[in-house]
Amino acid sequence: MQGYLAEPGALTGLTAFIHDCRARHDALKAQMEQGRDRLLELHSNGGEPARVLAQTIAAQDNDSQLVNFALNLFDIIGISQEDRSDNLLVLKPSDHMLVPDFPGVPEEGCTITFNRDQALAREETQFISWEHPIIRNGLDLVLSSESGNSALSLLKNKALPVGTLLLELIYVVESQAPRNLQLNRFLPATPLRLLLDKNGTNLAPQVEFEQFNRQLNAVKRHTASKLVSAVQPEVHGMLTHGEPLVAEQARAQADSHLSAELSRLQALRAVNPAIRDDELEAVAENRRQVLRHLDEANWRLDAIRLIVVTHQ
């Protein structure tokens, strides 16, 4: 090539040189195709997946569950709410809040809306989403409080014998695993729910929370105290089944995810020599450490609800 650049007029062998360049170009292109980062392509893809993602975000903006949840949360915390026109709501601290000062709600109050267009049109208005600090602070406050961490409900269901006991348990994990293991992928901050019968069988996968919750009825405090005292031995026996089941679920999820990741790298290695042995060993070692720390994790019972079946 340097010869042709030095003497542009010397064209002897130029055709062969061009064919040789083409062959080398095709070979390098094929090699790059075999070693391309398919995961990067997946996350960089536009077109239909991007359109679906945009529609999902728009659906979340119009989610009525967020509105109902937020209004209920404000009631629980004790934040005063004042309706304004144009989908606006004014939040102000009250004298009966769970805490003296609630982060995100100043003493003079603030104006919020659940409509994105409305928030864009009015600079002083805050747009409330699931990620907004007011919602997140409210969740942290409720979850860290002891209020509501135990309850008793009645289930009117003639398909079950009167007096049948069900125990709904909410667990959170406390682990000292190193941050680099990212153990929260398998033990997320969202609580893990179990619904146990007297034999320790977990019915939660078959019984969805919201639908089940609508079938339950509250019990007066005095009646609830008597019921709990009467079935206390049975409840203690059911509790012994809870923690092993939660640990088993998290371990199975972690094993499945990390084994799939290891298999993906092994398959990629078959067509891409750039995948090194130490990369495969690092993934395998990560899997071993995650499973080991899962076995050593401490499970904290965060909330409990006893359900008693009745026909009346």
Image (cartoon, grey):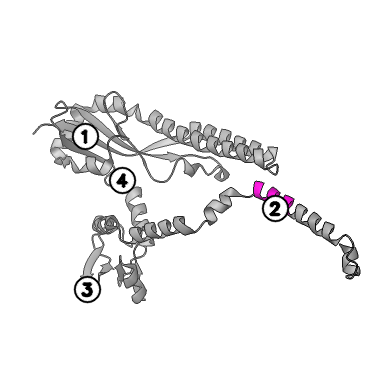
Front in this rendered view, residue 110 or 53: 53
Q: Which mark is residue 146?
A: 4
Q: Is residue 47 above or below residue 227?
A: below
Q: CA distance from mark 1 to mark 4?
A: 20 Å
* Label 4 residue SS: loop
Q: Residue at x 17, y 35 (%)?
A: 155
In the displayed structure, does residue 191 sit left or right of residue 45? left
Query: Which of marks 3 and 1 precedes in the sequence?
Result: 3
How crowded pointer 2 is (Cα within 10 Å; few <14, some 14-19, many 20+) is rated as few
Q: CA distance from mark 2 to mark 4?
A: 62 Å
Query: Which of marks 4 and 3 precedes in the sequence?
Result: 3
Report x, y in % for residue 38: 58, 49
Front in this rendered view, residue 64 or 312: 64
Quarter location, residue 238: top left
Figure label count? 4
Query: Which of marks 4 and 2 precedes in the sequence?
Result: 2
* Label 2 residue SS: helix
Marks 2 and 1 in Cβ contact (< 8 Å)? no
In the displayed structure, does residue 261 sit left or right of residue 250? right
Q: Is residue 12 above or below residue 217?
A: below
Q: Can the viewer see residue 49 in this picture?
A: yes
Q: CA distance from mark 2 to mark 1?
A: 65 Å
**Which quadrant would the N terminus be assigned to in this image?**
bottom right
Task: Tell me which amino acid carries mark 1.
Answer: Ile
List the residue tagged with mark 3. 85
Report x, y in % for residue 55: 38, 59
List the residue tagged with mark 2. 29
Task: Tell me which amino acid carries mark 2.
Answer: Lys
Report x, y in % for residue 121: 34, 76
Task: Tell me which amino acid carries mark 3.
Answer: Ser
Task: Tell me which amino acid carries mark 4.
Answer: Glu
* Label 1 residue SS: strand
